[in-house]
Amino acid sequence: MKFNSESFVITDTGKILRLFLMVGVAGLLLSLVGIIFNPSAFFHSYLTSVIFWTSIGLGALFMVMLHYLVNAVWSVVIRRVLENILITLPVMGLLFIPVLFGIPYLYSWNDNYESPSHSENHAISIVSDAYAEETVIEDDSEHEDVGTHTDPHKELLEKKKAFLNTPFFIIRTIIYFLIWSLIAVRIYKNSLKQDRDGASDANDGAGLRISAPGMILFALTVSFAGFDWMMSLDPLWYSTIYGVYFFSGCIVSVMAFVSVFSTWLRGKNILADIISEEHYHTIGKLLFGFVIFWAYMAFSQYLLIWYANIPEETIWYHHRWVGGWKFISVLIAVAHFTIPFIFLMPKNMKRNPKILSFWAIWILVMHWVDLYWNIQPNLYPDGAGFSWMDVTSMIGIGSIFLYFFWKNLSKNPILTLKDRKLGKSVNYVN
Amino acid sequence: MSKTKSRTAGCIAEFAGPGELLKAAEKVRDAGYKDFDCHSPFPIHGMDEAMGEKGSMLGPLVGLAAFLGGSGALLMQWWMSAVDYKVVIAGKPFFSYQAFFPVTFSLAVLFSAGMAVVGMLSMIKLRFHHPVFYSERFKKASDDMFFISVLSDDPIFSEEKTQLFLESIGGAYVEALRVDDE
């Protein structure tokens, strides 16, 4: 890898790209082997990983749109990095296709649902269990006899089928990715146009015109993506704040990713004097702020459900309080919020790129744990479980993500050189 | 009793703009003055450094206030709901920390906000009778003028030398601040 300090283009990235592509394909193929042994585990691992990497892209999309809407100055120096993250969204859309094939293994609202656990009618039994844990029906044939009277939960599920059915789920997922890709490609093209033709009011205006309606569409689609992909794993459970909870995770992860990546660039002496400690300070402040925002959302959801104490709602937390899940629940409260909250508070922690990226990696790991804790109790209802496919699919999808990220990054200058606010941004002071 | 004693409490100089003020502040700092201040109608980036100000103690103090407020709130709620006046609410334990969090959070914010305001006011040494108010021209400091004032409490202050120094670094209308002590 070489860096041209005149044109700000990274060249000779062939070696890195080949490595990412090889690791990515190998990781995905290795995960695919798992589909033969345990399809349920494969699809749960795959869903966790693909949502993790998509959430980073979504966070970048939000940050760039926000950048245009508020006419931000400081973020000009990292705008191109963010743009190269968000342009991976179309690729993530393609990588999401296997999840659509996995619907029978993932979502119990599906008619062909194949439950990973022993009880055959998982979706219904999970709530019924909460009412009468002693009267667990062990024989399935007996279950059918008892089931002659109408189960209120089954009825509820029938009513939800107007929304939660396979064709509509696939259509919705396609719509989400189409909207995100459309905004992403238009933002990206507009930015490249600026590189070619120079900054103009028309160019800035175009960015604004994409971002303003884009922000509204983004808010709706991200909320519904959270409902569809993760909340509907337990189709009888509902939480209106869940979409915002998913969104807060997106922002936290992208700020963490940007601080790690720019520190890595700094280590290679790229943009070392352009992304200054003032910028790290601001990235750190946003990271800190959105960690608090995430905790606020997570706690708001928990507090209301805890207070009302209605079985249909508490069952979700009940599942996450069983066996090893209890430990992970506490771990998330402590390590996703309390520890970063205390350690990211001092100014020095945010101004030192290496310390900041340590906490950023910490938060990225915890963001994965958070998604894992949201998704996988569906697979392991009796206590936390772990599969080797969690690792391989994470590395596989991550490498493909990084491959496309690098590929786009090395095609164009790593800095938006023609931006009129660039000089102001470089000399930005907190 | 009607006799007033006049003394020099410091001197003041005027600068053309924020950039000039910043450079002048650096020179005053390098000359070794400690008890001086810059006056401008708006905040100037980098002024803390130019004046040689060290980091403020306010942050840690606010942190301490937040900790005290938060733990005080928890203690108060524990004492009220689990010791002094036990009432079963919705069948939940007496000490339900989940329910206490909003109040804990709010009191932590209240204490830290209070500490931030009171601490700031006490640390910036706000006075009602500051020598600069004896200067007629200083009134424009809240409008469109930039000033540096050096007070006579400074160990290296000397009425003549300081005025000459302020003139040498580009200050205009240098004047001594004559204060009437009653």
Image (tube, rainbow, N blue to C red):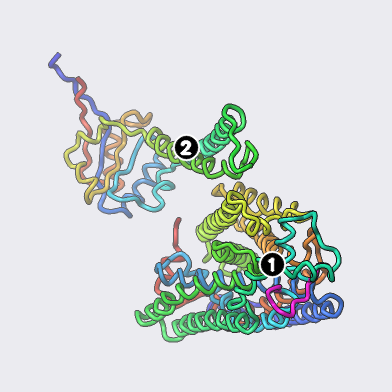
Please provide the residue range marked out in magenta: A107-120
Q: Main secondary structure of the magenta part?
A: loop
Which class describes the residues within 10 Å of circle 1: few (<14), some (14-19), or many (20+)? few
The percent coordinates of residue A129 (x first, y second) are 74, 59
Whether residue A144 sits left or right of residue A270 in the image: it is: right
Query: Which chain does tag 2 point to?
Result: B
Q: Amino acid at mark 1?
A: Asp
What distance separates the C-alpha of mark 2 from that of mark 1? 52 Å
The percent coordinates of residue B93 (x first, y second) are 65, 39
Tell which residue pokes out farthest to the left in this image: B2
Whether residue B120 sits left or right of residue A7 in the image: it is: left
Which class describes the residues within 10 Å of circle 2: few (<14), some (14-19), or many (20+)? some
Query: Which chain does tag 1 point to?
Result: A
Q: Nearer the viewer, mark 2 or mark 1?
A: 1
The percent coordinates of residue A274 (x first, y second) are 52, 66
For label 1, the residue is: A151
The percent coordinates of residue B71 (x first, y second) are 57, 35
- Label 2: which secondary element: helix
Residue A409 can be seen in this image: no
Residue at position x 82%, y 79% in the image: A35
For label 2, the residue is: B111
Q: Nearer the viewer, residue A244 or A190?
A: A244
Residue at position x 53%, y 73% in the image: A61
Q: Nearer the viewer, residue A173 or B161?
A: A173
